[in-house]
Image (cartoon, helix red, strand yellow):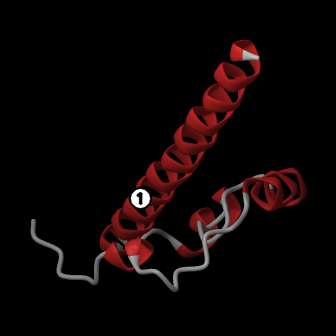
Amino acid sequence: MRVRTGWADYVFEENYDLMPLDKVELYLKANKHLPNVPSAETILEEGLDLGEITKIQQEKIEELTLYLIQLSNKLKEQQEQINQLLQK
């Protein structure tokens, strides 16, 4: 089976609005599913488009990659600050 649909590379564009993790957390608590992902109830009622859900999952993978990069950069920055404090 081959599905032709758009792909999620737009996540890596500079103007992509990556939701801050604190807002993702609030969204999860309120809605019990990820932003821009259909709920289990919606899927049960309306069904699932395999091409679309694959694209959505790829979007989430790419967003996770961006979050990891942000956290890695912050961790490096904090380690540098710790090292500077230890040298004093």
The percent position of residue 1, horizontal first and vertical second, equals 9, 65
Toward the viewer: 19 or 4? 19
Quadrant where the C terminus lies? top right
Q: Which residue lies most toward the front here? A: 88
Whether 50 is drawn above or below 5: the answer is above
As helix, strand or loop, the secondary structure at mark 1 comes to helix
The percent position of residue 41, horizontal first and vertical second, equals 70, 62
Left or right side of 86 for 11: left
The percent position of residue 54, horizontal first and vertical second, equals 34, 63
Toward the viewer: 17 or 47? 17
Toward the viewer: 40 or 86? 86
Image quarter of residue 30: bottom right
Residue drawn at 39 percent across, 72 percent down = 12
Image quarter of residue 44: bottom right
- Give the residue type at disc 1: Glu
> 10 Å neighbourhood of mark 1: few (<14), some, or many (≥20)?
some
* Residue at the spot of label 1: 62
Image quarter of residue 21: bottom right
